[in-house]
Image (spheres, helix red, strand yellow):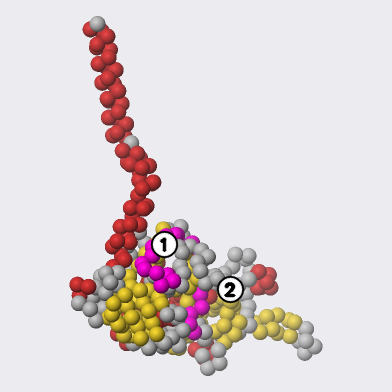
């Protein structure tokens, strides 16, 4: 009996020890396994609860935006960021807050090139809930993002998705393109324009701007202006009322297989082929050359004159998007930059160029 009791007690103690060891060794794994089911929703709810008081619904009269959009408060002075196409040329801007507050706003400035605008409301500080910006340069493909806005004139809506691509190029509201754009599959619909794209830290990493869709509804391909460019534009609009960009004054495209074969380049060579130079533009005053064929008097093709831009100020640029993004983030009009150019596939040269303004 004593032996039996002792055996039972030892078995019980052994079981307790195993349980304690299991709890001690595996708590994080067990908790994480449970958390994987419930944790994302908890985070989404927390982010929404924290961020939604900063997000506004915007209705306008007198422009081509379709009458509505979204935006978000960026400071306690009442400045709100939205898309330029939402508020530009509007006669009246009405802003609705989550708590039911409705007020008029004035347009501080609109930058058509980036499709970013700043409006301002006059409200007490305690009614304003600024949202923080994150660093859009730190984004990674596959990262979870949330979009908050007022699609189709409905009240605040939260959608989720991932960063599905980075460094996209989209057309702005001018003939110039916007570089470094974020692509997301989070549902973005008409009315979401100007609203924030948010990371799981509750920071704005982009401004929802465009979708690719034949039906004007979400098709899983939406674009957001990156936060770092948005901040630069917004601060300049508040301080000066307008944004001025530097530009080179070229037409160009990425190196393709035909160019690689023509110049006997490696089949992974990247760069920007200078296909044209704008008359009276900055590049016209530099040593850059546009593409041209060299022929004999009889018309036989001898070769091709061709400049490929491979770097700016020592920073590698593999595509036109890279160049556009670098200019927008790092340069000012009248600044002199150094373009590294591969000429005719054989000679690498540095060309100084003084940037113009657009």
Question: Dividing the picture into quarters, in which one does residue 232 lie?
Answer: bottom left
Q: Position of residue 74 (x, y in %)?
A: 29, 74
> For numbered disc 1, what is the local secondary structure?
strand
Q: Residue at x 36, y 68 (%)?
A: 155
Query: Quick check: marks 1 and 2 in contact, CB under 8 Å?
Result: no
Marks 1 and 2, how far apart at CA: 35 Å
Observer-nearest residue: 296 or 272?
Answer: 272
What element does badge 2 sit on?
strand
Circle count: 2
Residue 33 position in % (x across, y down): 38, 42
Q: Which mark is residue 159?
A: 1
**Residue occupying the far right of the picture:** 298
Is residue 323 something that shows in the picture? no
Percent x, y for residue 188?
A: 45, 67
Q: Earlier in the sequence, mark 1 or mark 2?
A: 1
Q: Is residue 227 above or below residue 274?
A: above
Which region of the structure is painted magenta? 151-174
Magenta segment includes 173: yes
Seen from the viewer's position, the closer of residues 258 and 223 is 223
Instruction: Name which residue lies at 62% across and 66% down.
Output: 266
């Amino acid at each position: 009996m004593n032996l039996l009791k002792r055996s039972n007690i030892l078995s019980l103690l052994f079981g307790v020890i195993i349980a304690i060891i299991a709890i001690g060794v595996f708590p994080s794994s067990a908790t994480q396994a449970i958390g994987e089911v419930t944790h994302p929703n908890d985070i989404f709810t927390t982010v929404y609860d924290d961020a939604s008081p900063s997000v506004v619904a915007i209705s306008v009269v007198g422009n081509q935006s379709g009458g509505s959009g979204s935006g978000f408060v960026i400071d306690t002075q009442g400045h709100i960021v939205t898309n330029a196409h939402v508020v530009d040329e509007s006669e009246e801007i009405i802003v609705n807050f989550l708590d039911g507050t409705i007020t008029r706003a004035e347009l501080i400035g609109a930058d058509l090139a980036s499709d970013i605008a700043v409006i301002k409301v006059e409200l007490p500080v305690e009614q304003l809930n600024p949202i923080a910006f994150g660093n859009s340069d730190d984004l990674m493909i596959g990262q979870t993002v949330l979009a908050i806005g007022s699609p189709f004139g409905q009240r605040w809506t939260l959608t989720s998705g991932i960063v599905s691509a980075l460094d996209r190029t989209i057309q702005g509201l001018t003939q110039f393109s916007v570089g470094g754009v974020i692509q997301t599959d989070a549902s973005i619909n008409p009315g979401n324009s100007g609203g924030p794209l948010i990371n799981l830290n509750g920071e704005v990493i982009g401004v929802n701007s465009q979708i690719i869709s034949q039906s004007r509804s979400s098709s899983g391909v939406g674009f957001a202006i990156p936060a770092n460019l948005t901040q630069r534009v917004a601060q300049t609009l508040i301080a000066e009322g307008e944004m001025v960009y530097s530009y080179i004054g070229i037409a160009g495209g990425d190196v393709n297989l035909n160019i690689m074969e023509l110049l006997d380049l490696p089949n992974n060579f990247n760069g920007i082929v200078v296909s044209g130079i704008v008359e009276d533009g900055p590049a016209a005053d530099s040593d850059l050359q546009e593409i041209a064929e060299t022929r004999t008097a009889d018309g036989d093709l001898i070769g091709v004159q061709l400049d490929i831009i491979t770097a700016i100020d020592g920073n590698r640029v593999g595509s036109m998007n890279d160049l556009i993004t670098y200019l927008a983030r790092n340069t000012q009009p009248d600044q002199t930059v150094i373009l590294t150019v591969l000429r005719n596939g054989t000679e690498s040269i540095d060309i100084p160029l003084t940037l113009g303004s657009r």
